[in-house]
Image (cartoon, rainbow, N blue to C red):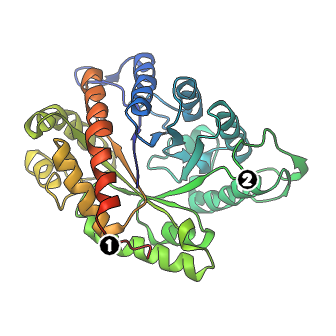
């Protein structure tokens, strides 16, 4: 299993003024976090795209390019690229360039996005949200396959037999499809034979196990080999040297952020009881010391047989030194133990 991290580069929120502060420091700290993740042996780091004051990164490829110059091995991905409001040609060019800078370590995680601010910003029609995404995804896949493109659609000017450069360093630039569990998105990934990143941020993850199985079954029925039908589980969490400390550090930033976003979306407010329930083995939140995270990753591997696990450490703003310590523990304690266990012990895998 590949094990890694992702971040939305959240910026500190001042509740007295409602303002979000200092994106420059947050972006520089993020690059340092990616560098440390590489040094401690993690496999993947993803950077999200947002167009809001509470997140510092609107251009993940630029941040990942800075990280490419300071890392050697770690895979560098968006998490996610909001493809519906992007130009697929420019997305492909940016990540092909990143692929060369990183010597073949770039990938794209494409999704519809959990926020919609980018659509009016770039003149896109939200009423055609899913149709735009479908069309642009097919263009992105065509760009990956062919150097010269002849293409037309409803939501972008046509391309009349034009070349697109640079081509990536890898023979096939990896493209993952990020989903939140909607059946249409899952079946789209299966139909296209794209690896699927499944975000689980609340409730009992066991309820998502049939979704992962349906994706694999539908992908095989669509003619795709099982080894291409990879699944990533993307989750929230935090770790520290002991579980009480992890909860003490993460509770307030996590709860403030989720409740603030929840006000926008009509979610009920959550407090400590909900936080603690989500941190149990059967819940969605990965919280505790390294041993608790190891146990929970292995528990979920029994549910999903997944190929990748990505953890978002900073759901809300957490002091940089504590994030660095969490990355160190995740890379030196959690990841090696999970790899050893999955190598030495037969585990149920839904890919078989």
Residue at x-position 51% and y-position 28%: 71
Residue 39, percent across and down? 41, 29
Residue at x-position 49% and y-position 68%: 186
The residue beneath circle 1 is 348
Between residue 345 and residue 147, name the one nearer to us: 345
Image-quadrant location for residue 26: top left
**Dot 2 surroundings within 10 Å: few (below 14), some, or many (20 or more)?**
many
Note whether residue 260 is visible. Answer: yes
Image-quadrant location for residue 24: top left
The residue beneath circle 2 is 144
Q: Quadrant of the N terminus?
A: bottom left
Residue 303, percent across and down? 29, 69
Direction right: furthest residue: 161
Image-quadrant location for residue 137: bottom right
**Dot 1 surroundings within 10 Å: few (below 14), some, or many (20 or more)?**
few
Measured along the vertical axis of the image, is residue 67 above or below residue 278? Answer: above
For the residues labelled 2 and 1, the Cα–Cα distance comes to: 34 Å
From the viewer's perspective, tell me whether residue 14 is left or right of residue 45: left
Note whether residue 285 is visible. Answer: no
Residue at x-position 53% and y-position 31%: 72
Of marks 2 and 1, the one in the foreground:
1
């Amino acid at each position: 299993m590949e094990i890694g991290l992702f971040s939305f580069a959240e910026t500190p929120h001042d509740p007295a003024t409602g303002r979000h502060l200092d994106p420059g420091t947050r972006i520089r700290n993020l690059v340092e976090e990616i560098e440390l993740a590489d040094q401690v042996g993690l496999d993947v780091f993803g950077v999200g795209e947002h167009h809001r004051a509470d997140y510092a990164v609107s251009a993940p490829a630029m941040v990942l390019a800075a990280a490419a110059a300071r890392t050697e091995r770690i895979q560098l991905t968006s998490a996610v690229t909001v493809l519906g409001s992007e130009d697929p040609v420019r997305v492909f060019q940016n990540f092909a360039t990143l692929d060369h800078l990183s010597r073949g370590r770039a990938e794209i995680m494409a999704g519809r996005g959990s926020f919609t601010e980018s659509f009016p910003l770039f003149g896109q029609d939200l009423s055609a949200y899913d149709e735009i995404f479908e069309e642009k995804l097919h263009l992105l896949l065509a760009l990956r396959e062919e150097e010269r493109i002849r293409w037309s659609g409803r939501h972008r000017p046509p391309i009349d037999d034009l070349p697109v450069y640079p081509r990536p360093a890898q023979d096939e630039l990896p493209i993952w499809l990020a989903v939140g569990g909607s059946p249409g998105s899952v079946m789209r990934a299966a139909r296209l034979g794209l690896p699927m990143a499944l975000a689980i941020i609340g409730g009992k993850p066991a309820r998502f196990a049939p979704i992962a199985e349906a994706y694999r079954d539908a992908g095989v029925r669509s003619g795709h080999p099982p080894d291409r039908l990879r699944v990533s589980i993307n989750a929230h969490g935090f770790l520290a040297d002991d579980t009480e400390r992890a909860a003490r550090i993460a509770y307030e930033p996590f709860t403030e952020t989720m409740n603030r976003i929840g006000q926008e979306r009509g979610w009920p407010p959550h407090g400590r009881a909900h936080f603690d329930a989500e941190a149990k083995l059967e819940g969605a939140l990965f919280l505790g010391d390294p041993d608790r995270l190891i146990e929970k990753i292995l528990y979920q591997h029994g549910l999903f047989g997944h190929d990748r696990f990505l953890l978002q450490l900073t759901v809300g703003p957490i002091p940089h030194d504590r994030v660095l310590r969490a990355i160190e523990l995740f890379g030196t304690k959690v990841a090696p133990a999970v790899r050893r266990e999955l190598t030495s012990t037969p585990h149920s895998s839904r890919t078989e």
